[in-house]
Image: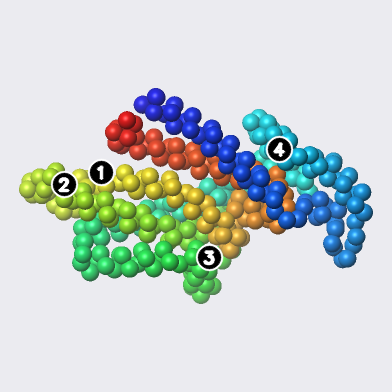
Amino acid sequence: MLAYIRRKFIHLIPITFAVTALSFLFINLLPGDVVDAIAGAGTDGAVVDQATVEAIRKDLGLDQPIVVRYGNWIAGALTGDLGKSYQTGQRVSEAIAHRLPVSIQLLVMAQVLALILAIPAGVIAAYRSGRLTDRVVTTLTFAFLATPSFVIAIVLMVLFAVLLKWFPATGFVPITKDVLGNLRSVALPALAIALIEWPILSRVLRNDMIATLQEDFVALAKAKGLSAGYILVRHALRPSSFTMITIVGIQLGNMISGAVIVETIFALPGIGSLLVESIHAREVLMVQGIVAIIAISYVLINFVVDLTYGTLDPRVRR
């Protein structure tokens, strides 16, 4: 097991460096420059002296080659220093640390809700395979898969916030101030993401469980007179969950991208909305820091999924 963990951990290093290097390159290829925003170029027809622009660029270190800037950034990142905002001077790590708990809560709640929807739907569809129940679940999964996250978010907002007024439309309440208010402020955004993610989990679980229900040990359990519910939950669910667990880790990337949109729609102060704000402001270091945190989180969660998979099925380690 230790050799398996060591091998997986070694794979994380080049992946992390590759992701951060590519994101740094792509961000610097974007049109526009944070120096223009700082100098006020283009506002009210103002024309900024080129010497002033070059002086600001040199002061910020933006006159250096991109390879040198990436080297300086990665050297600081290895010590925990992700740089400072060009415009506000706030440390990138502090800004991310302030916003990250909101995004983590959103993603955790969304994943829990997705599993709550997917597991019963997948189990029931497998048990009633080929019947009306299975066809209804299949239709629902394809319907939600075909619907963009922003459409679902807007529909939920109009229905439950504007018309029924059960939940707030926008804003965030810290859990330290009001637990119930916090859950209400995150419920709709989390549900919007969950409704996009549960169909895939449900379909994967359904297909695996159909195969599991044809195994000999399930036939033996039926011969012993065990109830269908007991067989489904105690005998068929665990061996049918391996692929779904793997998909949970892979889906994190989709959930993060969905969170960026959903946080913006519901005005949640998470790293998704911070990313959008930083892109508009051409805050290269802020964007790079957020992308690095997201990439590392994605890699680490997939690492944990691999370990979990290896624990559930020892054959994977070989």
- Whether the residues at callouts 2 and 1 have beta carbons within 8 Å, the answer is yes
- Residue occupied by mark 3: 150
- N-terminal of the pair, mark 1 or mark 3, is 3
CB of mark 3 within 8 Å of CB of mark 4?
Answer: no
User: Which residue, given by chain and number where applicable, does mark 4 sit on?
Assistant: 67
Label 4 sits on what residue type?
Answer: Val
Amino acid of disc 3: Phe
Q: Secondary structure at mark 3?
A: helix
In the depicted view, which residue is nearer to us: 32 or 201? 32
Label 2 sits on residue:
215
Q: Number of numbered discs present?
A: 4
The image shows residue 158 at horizontal and vertical percentages of 52, 72
Q: SS at mark 2?
A: loop
User: First in sequence: mark 2 or mark 1?
Assistant: 2
Residue 42, quarter of the rendered image: bottom right
- Between disc 4 and disc 2, the foreground one is 4
Q: Nearer the viewer, mark 2 or mark 1?
A: 2
Query: For the residue carrying disc 3, how many other residues have a C-alpha within 10 Å: few (<14), some (14-19), or many (20+)?
Result: some
Secondary structure under badge 1? loop
Residue 110: image location, x then y, percent: 46, 54
